[in-house]
Amino acid sequence: MPVSETEITNLKRKVDRYKEVLGNTKSYREKWKTELKKHISDQLTALAEAAGLTVEIEERSGIQNLEAIALSLGTEVSGLREPVGNDLLRDLIKQNGNLVYQQLFNGKILVLINYPFIENYGQPQPPKTVAIYRPEELKDPYFVRHMETFMQEIMMWEDYDDDIEEPNQRIGFKLNFQGLPDGAPDANQ
């Protein structure tokens, strides 16, 4: 089967784009190592200090080129205690949440929020993805915005109640029964 010159040209464009993407991955990884990792850590440290927020900056480097910098609000005793027998009580530990800047497999930077979690008390909420950036897109003003988003999400978690109706706070099988008169058929049945 003969192949047209147009088909070959289109294939060559795709191959060239593929090579460019692979080159970007190498470039992004190198930028992380040489400058971005330190810059993220410095920015988070400076913002926390300026805001009067006590944090820990953690470098996670378990897998090369999937490293992360995390601003952590730390770990503490939650105030909840469970009985373990013979009048003994065990404190439940609370992870206070963190803001994470992690390299993806392709060298781009994933920014996400890990919500607080109390051990043995429900399931942790899934992380919230804030954004994904190429290294050159991660500008200094974004760090302030990320910190503000992080603090807002953590405050909402800490101040949880049922006053604000959100999809995750509905009764039962994600159905909202408020406003249905007694005996009225539910349209979702």
Image (cartoon, rainbow, N blue to C red):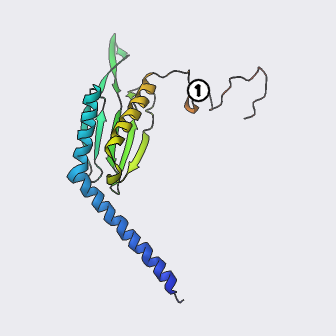
Relative side of 34 to 72, left or right: left
Give percent across and percent down for residue 85.
Answer: 35, 14
At label 1, which amino acid type do we have? Glu
Front residue of 12/89: it is 12
Front residue of 92/49: it is 49
Relative side of 126 to 55, left or right: right
Front residue of 90/165: it is 165
Q: Can you say whether 86 is above or below 39 in the image?
A: above
Tag 1, which secondary structure? loop
Residue carrying label 1: 165
Give percent across and percent down for residue 69.
Answer: 28, 42
Does any portion of residue 113 appear in the rendered image? yes
Does any portion of residue 189 appear in the rendered image? no
Q: Can you say whether 89 is above or below 28 in the image?
A: above
Q: Quadrant of residue 115?
A: top left
Which residue corresponds to the image point at 39% horizontal and 41% vertical from the top-left? 112
Which residue corresponds to the image point at 45% horizontal and 26% vertical from the top-left? 156
Which residue corresponds to the image point at 37% horizontal and 15% vertical from the top-left? 83
Give percent across and percent down for residue 70.
Answer: 29, 39
Mark 1 surroundings: few (<14), some (14-19) or many (≥20) residues within 10 A:
few
Q: Can you say whether 158 is above or below 132 in the image?
A: above
Quadrant where the N terminus lies? bottom right
